Amino acid sequence: MNIQAQCCGIILMLFLLFFYRRKKQVGLFTEQVFQKTLLVTMASVFLDILSIVAITHRSEMKPVLLAFFCKSYIVSLVWVGYLGLIYVLMDLYVEKVYRKVVRQYTVLAGIASVIIFCLPIYYYQNERIVYTYGPSVFTTYVCAMLFVCNTFFHMIRYRKSVNPMRRNAVLLWMSVWIIAAFIQFMDNRLLLVGYACALGIMILFFTLENPDALLDRQIGCFNSYALIEYLNQLYDRQEDFSILWIALSHHRLSETGVLQTNKVNREIFHYLSKQTRAKIFKNVDKELVLIFQDESKLKSALLSLEMRFKSTWKAGENDTVLLNAVFVAMPKGLLARNTEEILKIQRDFKSQEQLTYDKVHWIDDQFVGEERRKEAVKEMIVAAIEHDRVEVFYQPIYSTAKKKFASAEALVRIIDEEGKIVAPGAFIDVAEETGLILQLGEIVFDKTCQFIKRRKLGEIGIEYIEVNLSVLQCEKKELAQIYKKIMDKYKLPPSYINLEITETASIQTKRTLLENMRVLIGQGVTFSLDDFGSGQANLNYIIDMPVEIVKLDLNMTRAYFQNDKAKLVVQATVDMVHEMGLRIVAEGVETEEQLNEMQRIGVDYIQGYYFSKPLPREEFLKFIGNQGK
Ligand code: C2E
Ligand code: CA
Ligand code: CA
């Protein structure tokens, strides 16, 4: 009997099935489709053999049974064609839509099968030549070709959306199949179609579906690629899940010998697989990532994990180690919108929170909400910079000696898309975290210089404008040069500028800042120390930094009127600042009583709502223009 090629095919596929089933599976949808394809193809080759055997022995067989075997085989070919198509469609739709589309094709293939079963079939056998023909066979060819053509059509039409590896694999699979069918058609002795099916499956397996490609070679868990695929699937299906990241750092205490990291990691993996019913992955940061079906499974796993990590692990023959583990858990995985976001949330969480060993850190709704706010704020700042919606408001500062408004503080504002004014309280933290404050600071400085020059503030009695510098700006070596260039651009005498600095704990920043200050002071710029009294080591800062003005923090001004001790401190500060030859500003003066009291204790400048809130350019000009009237 002419069934050698088919038998080889079956053996090949049995091997494949054996290896495939032996490996752990992530639980991906693609794995399911591949398994189905493998089983249908095997069934098809098996039916091929069966039909040849049946035709050869047709004299001893009931015609109905013979027809059933032969038709089952040709029907299976339609289903192989169908599988090629749904394999390609996998990349084109999200799972829900995909299932719907597949359902339609399944119905079509089903109808085709029924028709094929109903039509007559004829047999031909002459020694090694065995084949079937007739309306049933003809319909099979047409239907199978329709599926194959549809597959090619989708691959060409949507070539950009189909994973190129999948495209090439399916292309090769279908081509092998068609070539085999053609050869078989030309020479009826060469029954190659069954074998070609097996080859096609091998191609799929080695290019796309090899489970080894999803495994971490060192410890045997799933790898970062599998993690991403699996997360994508969870978000696609909107299936709730809980996730745990375990970062391990090595030995807190090792007895002797060299630590065999892999051995320890394998032991941990073994333990985790046994103890938890989670899927275990290793991500690109080499952390273990455990995905649970729900929160209760995560929590019960954590209970035993926390205990287990308190004792030692085997690291060699007679060697044990204790490991430091940092647990980061997110009970509600769907709080994030997609894979990209959940990975970003975890990264940000790690960089923002102080993570300690042997403790579980929770990523909760609040953290995710805050992340979203920051992301939205960041987008707002970027858009504002791009569309020139960064504005500067000016808050007048009253000189008690001159009894007039002699300066002002420049304060940044963003005009949002709807034209609403957004105060810095809503975005300065994000601007600093993202580094956007560098651009914002420069824009504010540029606009302030332009304003002073164009509107001739000097002529209306404004001696200088105070502009805030963020710590990030102070750290930049180029700060002085950039600011100098901006002042040059407007031909603005630098004495119109007073830069407000705040405390920084970093010695390196302080050094760079001092260098920047030296250059700018050389040009004629002056400096203030902002927020005095809000930090811890302010006194040192006044001593070390070449500032001319000290700005009493808003809260200190407030405390003065509420608390006797604060009163003494503020009074002493004013005296001390004067003794050092510096001047002092009281911020946050809101009432006449506060104004009088501040004047009485000798404060040089008053800034606060009592006089005015920060004002947009024109209103500020009007406000200053009105003084003395
Ligand atoms: P700051 O430098 O301490 O600025 C003073 C803040 O106190 C301003 O808030 C001002 O509107 C507010 N203020 C003034 N007088 C009163 C008062 O009598 N009562 C009350 N309750 N508040 C008063 P604003 O404009 O919202 O700015 C907040 C902070 O944002 C600033 O505090 C500063 O740290 C930062 N900021 C503002 N503009 C810039 C900028 O251009 N660059 C940088 N790096 N930071 C800026
Ligand atoms: Ca300030
Ligand atoms: Ca301040």
Image (cartoon, rainbow, N blue to C red):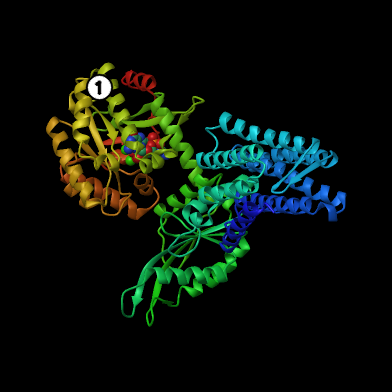
Total numbered badges shown on the rendered structure: 1
Q: Is residue 540 above or below residue 442?
A: below
Q: Which residue is mark 1?
A: 461
Q: Viewer-proximal residue, 163 or 472?
A: 163
Q: Secondary structure at mark 1?
A: loop
* Residue 479 visible, this orientation: yes
- Taking the view exactly as shown, the residue that stands out farthest to the front is 127
Choose top left, top right, bottom left or bottom right for residue 450: top left
User: Quick check: which quadrant has ligand 1?
Assistant: top left
Could you tell me if residue 595 is visible in this image? no
Q: Within the image, what quadrant is residue 10 found in?
A: bottom right
Of 218 and 127, the residue lying toward us: 127
Which amino acid is tagged 1?
Gly
The answer to whether 134 is drawn above or below residue 275 in the figure is above
- Where residue 497 sits in the image (x, y, percent)? 22, 29
Q: Estimate the x, y position of residue 435 in percent, counting from the top left.
A: 34, 40
Q: Residues within 10 Å of mark 1 (few under 14, many from 20)?
A: some
Q: Nearer the viewer, residue 96 or 2?
A: 2
In the rendered view of the protein, which quadrant contains the N terminus? bottom right
Ligand 1 closer than 8 Å to the CB at disc 1?
no
**In this image, 516 relative to 135: left or right?**
left
Query: Can you give x and y, in whole percent of width and height, for residue 426 in the image?
Result: 45, 38
Give the x, y percent position of residue 26.
Answer: 57, 57
Taking the image as shown, residue 558 lies to the left or right of residue 569, namely right
Q: Is residue 488 above or below residue 135?
A: above
Q: Residue furthest bottom?
A: 318
Q: Residue at x 49, y 46 (%)?
A: 370
Q: Is residue 108 above or below residue 273?
A: above
Tell me which residue sits at (60%, 49%) in the image. 30
**Quadrant of residue 324 in the image?**
bottom left
From the viewer's side, name the closer residue of 263 and 430: 263
